Image (cartoon, rainbow, N blue to C red):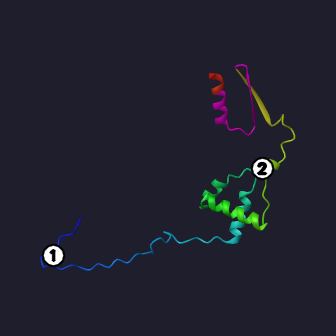
Amino acid sequence: MSATMPGDRSFHLIEAVPDRMEGAPVAQRRRWSDAFKAEMVARSLEPGTNVSALAREIGISPPQLFGWRTEAIKRGEVERRDEAAVPAPTSRVSSMIEIEVNDTVIRVGIDIGEDHLRRVIRAVRSA
């Protein structure tokens, strides 16, 4: 919508000064200390850690934390822990439970979530 022109046909000069250059980041870049990065990389390498959840917790994007991990591993600052290399529990019998439903045996680890187990049992009962 345009403004009406004054009766004397004059115009007003408006100067627009941008707050930032075109294409510049909206926010200033944050700088993370090497100590903070090292601590977060160490936390992310702990067994059972969800790296994406940790990244969101500390306020960065998951790819950024994965990048920090990759760089730390390349520099030899940390060792990559292979989940497959973690030894299995010595007693598989004590870490499993068996549930019999409708002539079907369900074997699950003791670390299964209650909601997930309920869904499995419901599925077996309805089959």
Which comes sooner in the sequence, label 1 or label 2? 1
At 71% across and 62% down in the image, what residue appears?
A: 70
Side of 74 where 21 appears, left or right: left
Quadrant of res 94: top right
Q: Is residue 91 visible?
A: yes
At 49% across and 72% down in the image, what residue appears?
A: 24
Q: Could you say whether the residue bearing mark 2 is in a helix, strand or loop? A: helix
- Count numbered badges in the picture: 2
Q: Which residue is mark 2?
A: 83
Span shown in magenta: 102-121
Q: Of the numbered discs in the image, which one, if any, rests on residue 118?
A: none
Residue 115 on image: x %, y %: 64, 36
Q: Which residue is mark 1?
A: 6
Q: Amino acid at mark 1?
A: Pro
Side of 87 where 9 appears, left or right: left
Quadrant of res 34: bottom right
Q: Amino acid at mark 2?
A: Glu
At 80% across and 60% down in the image, what residue appears?
A: 79
Q: Is residue 40 visible?
A: no
Image quarter hosting the C terminus: top right
Residue 95 counted in the magenta span: no
How many residues crowd around disc 2 within 10 Å: few (fewer than 14), some, or many (20 or more)? few
Quadrant of res 41: bottom right
Viewer-proximal residue among 123 and 84: 84
Residue 19 on image: x %, y %: 42, 75
Residue 54 on image: x %, y %: 65, 56
Name the residue furthest right: 90
Name the residue furthest top: 103
Residue 114 counted in the magenta span: yes
How many residues crowd around disc 1 within 10 Å: few (fewer than 14), some, or many (20 or more)? few
